[in-house]
Amino acid sequence: MNAKRTDFLATVVINLIVATVVGILVFLLAYILISGLPHVSWSFLTGTTDAFSGAGGIGVQLFNSFYLLILTMLISVPISLGAGIYLAEYAKDNWRTSLIRSAIEVLSSLPSVVVGLFGFLLFVVKFKIGFSVISGAIALTFFNLPLLTRNIEESLSAVSRSQREAGLSLGLSKWKTEIGIILPVALPGIVTGIVLSAGRVFGEAAALIYTAGQSAPVTNFGDWNPMDPASPLNPFRPAETLAVHIWKVNTEGLANNAAQLSAAASAVLIIAVLLFNLGARLLGNFLYRRVTASK
Amino acid sequence: MLKQYSFEETAVQTFDDKTSLAMKTENLQVFYGANHAMHDADLAFPKNQITALIGASGSGKSTYLRSLNRMNDGIATVTGKIWYHNVDINEPTVNIYEIRRHIGMVFQRPNPFAKSIRENIVYALRANGLKNKAELEERVEKSLRGAALWDEVKDSLDKSALSLSGGQQQRLCIARSIAMEPDVLLLDEPCSALDPISTVKVEETLLELQKKYSIIIVTHNMQQAARVSSQCAFFHLGHVMEYTPTGTMFSNPQIPVTQDYIAGSFG
Ligand SMILES: Nc1ncnc2c1ncn2[C@@H]1O[C@H](COP(=O)(O)OP(=O)(O)OP(=O)(O)O)[C@@H](O)[C@H]1O
Ligand SMILES: [Mg+2]
């Protein structure tokens, strides 16, 4: 077989594989959207759920999902940034570093149910915080840290050594070099990692059932003082998220339109994840252009 | 098979007390783990002159150069003395960040930051506490003029440095170094990635810069060493073999190894 023919065959095979992947994705998305969207209405998006039957709108759950996501990111991004910078730049190549790496690997392979039960026992029961946004956010942080740390470390390590040398040769400290010069270059990779982990967090149910809880008490959206028990921002209130809601409606929903409810909620969940990804990418690109002056 | 030359037979010049020196090394040894890459380098660099370090690939030129501003910290073990303003800057107690602000370095491959041209120059200045806007602008212009780049970029200071050509990037790196107003400038084959025209520009820049700075340049290109340097040191397998005024080195090398290298009949 000559080179041209090989190339042609390889191209055909690769295109077929890509088409299959894209096809599956499009089919899934279309199926979820077509079966769910007709049942989505403004009152569904903003309404409250009947605590007993699970019927009604998903306004509170939608808010909870975003609130939990943001809280989780606020906790996990700084920690994994620190850990990633440490591993990429400061850690020596010795047994302690490989121990840390293995620990991260083990943590990342923990099933989310286990993380959830651990959070339940530690925060909800032992620390008596109860089912709450904060318990959920910390459980999700456990679940999020290993992936984010790995991602940040890899993005930083991928930046050329010569950039580090340039910084150091100007008398900049290691830290200043890392933060001011390496991090901006690594930003697109890091944003991708954050987007991916955000998608996972947004869709996570198992880790939240026992931590953030399965109830979405009606909150007062006019009250933005995080200290008030009825405020949506209060981190100590139970907060059923959209993903948990879908699971619950499907398993124990008593409403007679349970199937439609969960289909509609799934469609909303998917759209929310897509919008979040898009937003994060736009923000990431904007930041990247700002710090690197590239067009 | 490489010809064997005696490491005992060397011709290394020294300077009398009247010559003011920018830097000087005594007994400098560098080890990469068990690899003894630099033996006993004793070199003195006169102020406001360009000194060229030449020698075959792997002879230890970069190793030596990188020791001078402690860029080998954490990579290699460097013993011996490095005198700079009567201080041995090879002491572990020395503030290496401070030292690197006085002894700047330009690398073989242009490595501008992924930032705007202006930001490439002011970033380190700002990090070192220079906040005055007007003063920063002044430094940008002065250093870009110094590196013979100003006319080409003065209208696009906010463009990404990565959009410049290789030669422009390298001159930007020189500008970035001299914006720190160092005393000594170390350059490791700064022209090896550049075309002849950019090379000429960089060389002209260096000749101009030696009025204010002391320059030590590693080069593979003997014509370049002859064109720009006043002193020239020849490295061979981790040893400094000969160190003389450049004219002498090329017209009348003192020892066989240098003679062979200059004549191109090495090994
Ligand atoms: N980072 C390093 N780790 C280990 N050994 C090194 C390192 N850098 C250089 N060496 C070794 O030190 C010796 C001298 O290398 P050096 O880079 O100083 O040579 P050079 O004269 O600059 O060569 P070239 O002209 O190719 O740049 C070589 O044997 C090389 O293998
Ligand atoms: Mg070299």
Image (tube, coloured by chain):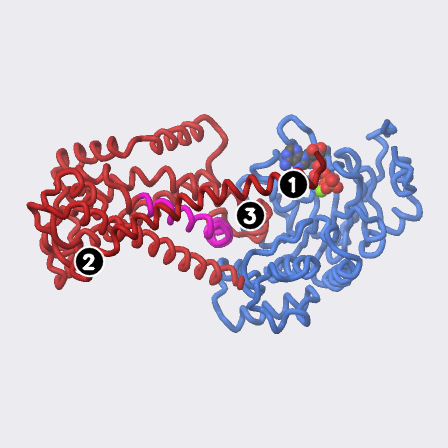
Mark identifier at residue B166:
none
Chain letter for red? Answer: A
Tell me the quadrant of the picture where the N terminus of chain B can be found: top right
Mark identifier at residue A45:
2
Q: Secondary structure at mark 1?
A: helix
Residue tagged by mark 3? A164
Question: Marks 1 and 2: CB-CB under 8 Å?
Answer: no
Name the mark nearer the viewer: 1 or 2.
1
Q: Is residue A54 left or right of residue A208?
A: left
Amino acid type, callout 3: Arg
Image hue for chain B: blue
Q: Residues within 10 Å of mark 2 (few under 14, many from 20)?
A: some
- Give the answer, above or below, for where B160 lies relative to A169: below
Tell me the quadrant of the picture where the C terminus of chain B can be found: top right
Please say whether residue B55 is one of the residues in the magenta stretch.
Answer: no
- Give the answer, above or below, for where A273 lies relative to A12: below
Ligand 1 appears in which quadrant?
Answer: top right
Amino acid type, callout 1: Asp
Residue tagged by mark 1? A7
Question: Which chain is disc 3 placed on?
Answer: A
Q: Earlier in the sequence, mark 1 or mark 2?
A: 1
Magenta segment, which residues? A176-200
Mark yes or no: residue B79 visible.
no
Q: Residues within 10 Å of mark 1 (few under 14, many from 20)?
A: few
Q: Is the residue at mark 2 from the same chain as the one at mark 3?
A: yes
Instruction: Please tell me how many numbered marks the rendered image carries.
Output: 3
Disc 1/disc 2 C-alpha distance (Å): 51 Å
Name the mark nearer the viewer: 1 or 3.
1
Residue in view at x 29 percent, y 41 percent: A141
- Residue B228 locus on image (x, y percent): 81, 56
